[in-house]
Image: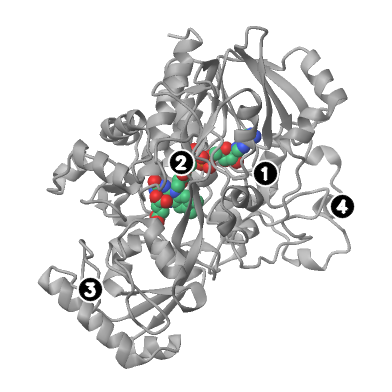
């Protein structure tokens, strides 16, 4: 039977370990009779938590209904209890790294990233040398750095080709930025588009991508992205993904953004699908495990990876290939600002681990980089709740107005243009305005409601009052826009796609402002996902995919193209790495 202790907050103990000890539980109630304690996933400890307290679902029921239940949140995989409930130190709600709500967590401390830099770790010479001089702790065919969509796609593809695979993830939970992906995955000429009567072509997706990227994209990588996009959707659906809802995001000429039915967020769904498949294929996935150094032999070929386990310390894994799928650096404001000073102090939509240290690991092994100065701000981040408001809200019919209640931009233009336009408005912010029919079309909106980001009113006039706007101006703006919808032409801002009028009670507003979202630059790769040095030579055994790479998106990524990128290039990297390792 599940046991929870509702009186936790009034205990004299300083942390959960003491609390358990005071209740007569010995160390072995949680730990093995180590050392070693267990592993960096704290698998044994987490299993023992559930023996007494029940599964996440059980705990959720025991605690009772609440508006936001962290136990049933958007974390894919099997998030460990110890992610938030630390034991020998104050617990820290991991969610508070992004969101602004507070949880009544016993013995809670404040979330703070505390880690040595990769440079510092590589320079701790005694520990470093001793770890490298010891025998490898494991030997596999392919090591993947990062458990986001690119990493899991690589792991699944490599394991499908019979490779033995270890994935290392430095955060306590899997999924990286991928688990947060909202609006969807772009692909052209898919079965899903055909079923909905949408006419698209590879040429059109290529033109949109290069136009969005200001012609700075690597055309060879774009060709791979586009030509394999439908195959990537098929690959995901063959593993059980639902990609049946097709909508539009900024900069696209037609509806090609694929997501689950009902407008559910794409990221958590596909990470879960990939995680389930990786588990079936016995991929060894280690969280709390940070890649520190790519090890090369005297000829410069990859021979393994030095990692730091949060609990198990520095050790190395032997393998002839490493796939770097460590994501971007949007959450590292100092690094962002070093490339684009305008973005200093900006909030970010990214997960806490998007600090760029995987990038650093690869460059220290000789990898070249490109396009580092291209960093994208997403136009619609809600400071209330600390959450990205998906472009799909606009794609499904919302408009943007300023404090005066007036539209000021084509809401479905590319992100760089929309973000710049918002920053030109008073207060550097704007409001998304939409109606009940948009809310119904996109289940993700319920999440924003739960986070307290949405102002809901029965009439437009009430909404204007609540926002402190002139009601006649807001009403006139919406009526004028509805006229454009009926006529099929936006005479004010030439918005091409106006999904529906804003006419059905109730009416909603979300305050938004731009936030750092995507780092387009990164490691230099070729179409085979091999990492290239600054001189353009491939580094033998080193592959990369996803946001850690540069070139695919040029100067500005289109909404929906990153998830397409990570699945296509991640899968490619896994196949090529397995092949390089000599696995059939
Ligand atoms: P990630 O998913 O970020 O994974 C990288 C992983 O590597 C992370 O878990 C990180 O912790 C880990 N890591 C880093 N360094 C190390 C190290 N040294 N050792 C071990 N592990 C390490 N794009 C779209 O196309 N459509 C969308 O709808 C969409 N919505 C988005 C919504 C949000 C809120 C955000 C933030 C992004 C969104 N994007 C979207 C962009 C897209 O999600 C990302 O670009 C993409 O998921 C990146 O995938 P990835 O696998 O390359 O990196
Ligand atoms: C969004 O849903 O607005 C984010 C999509 C993306 O970054 O591609």
The reply to whether the residue tagged 1 has its Cβ within 8 angstroms of ligand 1 is: no
Above or below — where is 447 with respect to 501? Answer: above
* Disc assigned to residue 272: 2
Label 1 to label 3, Cα distance in Å? Answer: 62 Å
Q: Residue at x 68, y 57 (%)?
A: 93
> Of marks 2 and 4, which one's residue comes earlier in the chain?
4
> Of marks 3 and 2, which one's residue comes earlier in the chain?
2
From the image, state whether disc 3 or disc 2 is nearer to you. Answer: 3
Q: Are marks 2 and 4 in contact (CB under 8 Å)?
A: no
Q: Are marks 4 and 3 in contact (CB under 8 Å)?
A: no
* Disc assigned to residue 492: 3
Label 2 to label 4, Cα distance in Å? Answer: 35 Å
Question: In front: 155, or 547?
Answer: 547
* Disc assigned to residue 18: 4
Q: Secondary structure at mark 3?
A: loop
Question: Which residue lies under the disc numbered 1?
Answer: 51
């Amino acid at each position: 039977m599940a046991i929870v202790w509702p009186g936790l907050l009034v205990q004299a103990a300083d942390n959960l370990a003491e609390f358990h000890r005071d209740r007569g539980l010995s160390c072995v109630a949680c730990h093995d009779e180590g050392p070693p304690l267990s592993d960096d996933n704290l698998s044994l400890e987490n299993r023992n938590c559930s023996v007494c307290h029940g599964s996440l679902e059980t705990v959720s029921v025991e605690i009772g209904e609440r508006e936001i239940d962290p136990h049933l949140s958007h974390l894919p995989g099997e998030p460990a209890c110890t992610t938030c409930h630390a034991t020998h130190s104050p617990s820290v709600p991991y969610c508070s790294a992004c969101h602004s709500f507070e949880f009544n967590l016993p013995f809670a401390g404040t979330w703070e990233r505390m880690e040595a830099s990769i440079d510092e770790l590589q320079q701790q010479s005694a520990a470093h040398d001793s770890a490298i001089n010891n025998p490898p702790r494991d030997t596999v065919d392919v090591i993947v750095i990062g458990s986001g969509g690119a990493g899991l796609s690589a792991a699944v593809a490599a394991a499908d080709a019979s490779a033995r695979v270890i994935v290392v993830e430095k955060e306590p939970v899997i999924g990286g930025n991928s688990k947060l992906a909202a609006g969807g995955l772009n692909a052209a000429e898919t079965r899903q588009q055909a079923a909905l009567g949408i006419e698209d072509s590879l040429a059109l997706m290529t033109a949109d991508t290069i136009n969005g990227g200001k012609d700075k994209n690597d055309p060879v990588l774009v060709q791979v992205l586009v030509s394999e996009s439908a195959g990537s959707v098929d690959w995901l659906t063959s593993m059980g993904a639902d990609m049946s809802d097709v909508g539009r995001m900024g900069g696209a000429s037609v509806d090609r953004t694929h997501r689950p039915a009902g407008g559910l967020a794409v990221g958590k769904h596909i990470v879960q699908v990939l995680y389930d498949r990786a588990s079936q294929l016995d991929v060894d996935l280690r969280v709390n495990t940070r890649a520190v150094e790519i090890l090369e032999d005297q000829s410069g070929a990859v021979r393994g990876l030095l990692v730091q386990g949060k609990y198990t310390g520095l050790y190395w894994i032997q393998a002839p290939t490493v796939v770097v799928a460590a994501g971007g650096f949007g959450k590292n404001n100092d690094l962002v600002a070093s490339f684009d000073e305008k973005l200093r102090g900006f909030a970010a939509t990214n997960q806490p681990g998007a600090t760029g240290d995987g990038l650093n690991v690869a460059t220290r092994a000789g990898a070249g980089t490109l396009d580092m100065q291209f960093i994208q701000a997403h136009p619609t981040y809600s400071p209330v709740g600390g959450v990205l408001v998906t472009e799909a809200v606009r794609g499904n019919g919302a408009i943007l107005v300023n404090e005066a209640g007036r539209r000021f931009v084509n809401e479905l233009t590319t992100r760089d243009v929309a973000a710049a336009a918002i920053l030109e408005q008073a207060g550097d912010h704007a409001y998304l305005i939409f109606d009940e029919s948009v809310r119904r079309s996109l289940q993700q909106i319920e999440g924003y409601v739960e986070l307290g980001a949405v102002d809901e009113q029965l009439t437009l006039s009430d909404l204007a009052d609540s926002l402190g706007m002139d009601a006649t101006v807001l009403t006139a703006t919406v009526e004028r826009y509805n006229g454009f919808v009926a006529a099929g032409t936006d005479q004010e801002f030439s918005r091409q796609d106006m999904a529906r009028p804003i006419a059905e009670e109730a009416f909603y507003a979300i305050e938004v402002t731009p936030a750092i979202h995507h780092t387009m630059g990164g490691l230099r790769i070729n179409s085979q996902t091999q990492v290239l040095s600054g001189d353009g030579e491939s580094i033998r055994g080193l592959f990369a995919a996803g946001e850690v790479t540069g070139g695919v998106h040029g100067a500005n990524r289109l909404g929906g193209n990153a998830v397409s990128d990570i699945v296509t290039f991640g899968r490619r990297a896994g196949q090529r790495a397995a092949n390089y390792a000599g696995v059939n």
